[in-house]
Each structure stands twice: as structure tokens, then as C-alpha cells.
Amino acid sequence: MLGKIALEEAFALPRFQEKTRWWAGLFATDVEKHVAEITDVDSIRLNFAEKHGVGLQILSYTAPGVQDIWDPVDAQKLAVEINDYIAEKVKAHPDRFAAFATLSMHDPQEAADELRRCVTQYGFLGALVNDTQRAGSDGDDMIFYDNEKWDIFWQTCTELDVPLYLHPRNPTGTIYDKLWADRKWLVGPPLSFAHGVSLHTLGMVTNGVFDRHPKLQIIIGHLGEHIPFDMWRINHWFEDRKKLLGLRETCKKTIRQYFAENIWITTSGHFSTTTLNFCMAEVGADRILFSIDYPFETFEDACDWFDNMEISDTDRLKIGRENAKKLFKLGAYKDSTA
């Protein structure tokens, strides 16, 4: 399929190459290849995209990114630097690249202002945030965005009519020490990423974020970070037990309604036809978006699977590009009507 849109595609600043190399050593089997791919915003990506039918890549700063910086001043400074950097790269290939804003999430007003700057000045399509923001004097605190303090930020998202991609980051501090240190091989895609984002997303549901901001759109990757597989059980306990005990005060709709109206999922890093079919049955093809998770995953694995799996042409087009075109209100890009 030509003209696919991919929207969980990471880049890193070249000036952090040594840090990127160290980080890659924790998960990459070919460190130098990973460093070359994640710091490239030009020929390597474009060649892969040309070969595998990806028309548009929405780029975002790699995890843990700014969410790993607990000093608010340093975090904001880096976020602005990243946004200015990627805006110039996108400008060179506007029919092939777009971008999500990188945000420091220490302060809701500051995050809202930087999002507005990126959308109005650069035409960014929204923001991607790597789960909770590290904070505190030693970086051991976590800032969640599911309470009323953050309403000014969510209101800005809805005013600008752009989504936020809630992406995972690695567990840190005492959370890592207590839960993951003795289970280090479960950090990342095997378990901890879904653990963090599903908690944060369901916190937004149960703490009334979507009720206060009914037009807000949130994207979560990896076929829903396990939530679709618990949909029946979550709904059963919310509707039949928890709401009788007080949940109905902050959670007005059903979990299925929030997924139908506010939450999108992507195929990033999860290339299973069986799993996708299950998610289509639970949340519907209209709320699923194609993504790769490059360079942590490959164009080849994602695109060969997506282009050749047995689903209807209608659903392939929806998931591959039409849903994203509507969500991001996109104009023409390479092979957008192929």
C-alpha cells in the first residue's frame, strides 16, 4: 500500500550522539546502526519510506527525552531546542515529514504555551509526551497529567484541535528499584511500557479529564498498551461495581465510549494480525492508526506485515492513512491518494 502515514517515528539530536550510543547499548543488537538511523532526518528514512510505501512520517523526539529531565529550566530549554531543530528538518521535506512537539511537562501553562508556539509557528500536528515527567530535587517524583491542575493544558489541546500522543518511558528512581531492578528484562516493550501508559490513560479516564474536555484526542501506541484486551473486565468493574461506589462522579461515560470518542491506538511495534483483528473487534478500525516505531522496529517488518495481512481493503486504507488524514486534517503529501 502506498501513502501510508507513520506516527511513532523517533529521532535524536546529533549532539547527544555519545549518550544515544550508551542508551542503545541497553537494547540494540547493532548500536552503530541504531545511532545512525535515529540521528538521521533525511536520506536513510526517506529511502526506507520510498521502498516500503510510507508517504508521511510524523517525527517525535525519542524516549525518555525531556520527560527524563527533572530540572524545570533545563527541561524547557531542551524542549525548545528540539522543536526548533526538527522544524527546520521538516521544512526541507514538507511532503514527507511532519512533527509532534516535544514538551517539558513540569508546568501546565508552560507546556500549553510551547504547544501553541509549535502548532501556530511551525505547523506541528500535536505533541508527543513520554509518559510522566520526572521531577523533584533528586528526580524521584513523577508528574501525572490526569488532575484538574492540567486542565489549562488539555484546554489548549482542544482549542488548537490537535492530539497528544502518550508514549512510554523507562521506569526510574524508587519505582525502578522496587519493581523492576530484579526483573530488568521486563523493562521496555515486554511489560513496563504498557504498565506505565495504561495506568496514565486510565487515570485520565477515571479522573474525569475527558468529561471536562470532551473533544480531547489522545493517541496510545503498541495496539493500546494492553487496555483493549481488558476492555470487557474494565467495563464490567467500572459500570457494575466502581460507579456504585462513587466513580460515576468523575467518569460519566463507559470505557468503550472514551475509546470511541477520545482515544486512538496505533500498530507501532506490534505487528500481529491476530492481535490487530482483536483490537478491531474491541475498538473498531476507525480508531486505529498505522505506525512503525522506527528505528526501534524496522520499516520492513511493519510494512510487509501491514501490506500483506488478510484484512479488507477498506480497513487497510482506514488504518494505513485515511484515519490519520482525518485526525490531523492533512492536505496532500507523497502518494496521499495513490
Image: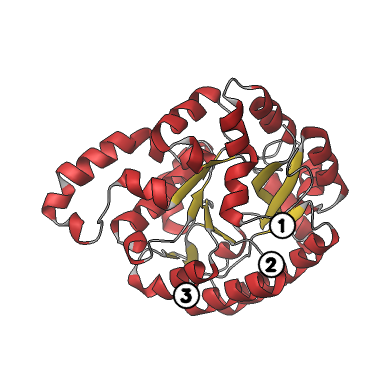
One can see residue 135 in this view:
no
The mark lying in front, picked from 2 and 3, is 2
Residue holding disc 2: 123
Measuring from the top left, give residue 276's x and y in whole percent. 51, 29
Q: Is 209 left or right of 87, judged from the image as shown?
A: left
| Residue 71: image tag | none
Q: Compared with residue 20, is residue 74 higher up or lower down, i.e. above or below? A: below
Residue holding disc 3: 108
Q: Which SS class for mark 3?
A: helix
Give the image's coloring scheme.
Answer: secondary structure
Q: Looking at numbered disc 3 in the image, what kind of residue is underneath it?
A: Pro
Measuring from the top left, give residue 124's x and y in whole percent. 66, 64
Mark 2 → mark 3, Cα distance in angstroms: 21 Å
Q: Residues within 10 Å of mark 2 (few under 14, many from 20)?
A: some
Q: Quick one: label 2 or label 3, which is nearer the N terminus?
A: 3
Q: Quadrant of the C terminus?
A: top right
Q: Looking at numbered disc 2 in the image, what kind of residue is underneath it?
A: Gly
Residue holding disc 1: 98
Q: Is 57 left or right of 119, judged from the image as shown?
A: right
Q: State if disc 3 and disc 1 touch (CB < 8 Å).
A: no
Q: Looking at numbered disc 1 in the image, what kind of residue is underneath it?
A: Ala
Q: Which SS class for mark 1?
A: strand
What residue do we see at 32% from left, 61% from top? 211
Front in this rendered view, residue 115 or 81? 115
Q: Residues within 10 Å of mark 3 (few under 14, many from 20)?
A: some
Mark 2 → mark 1, Cα distance in angstroms: 8 Å
Kindly indicate the quadrant of the structure image that contains residue 234.
top left
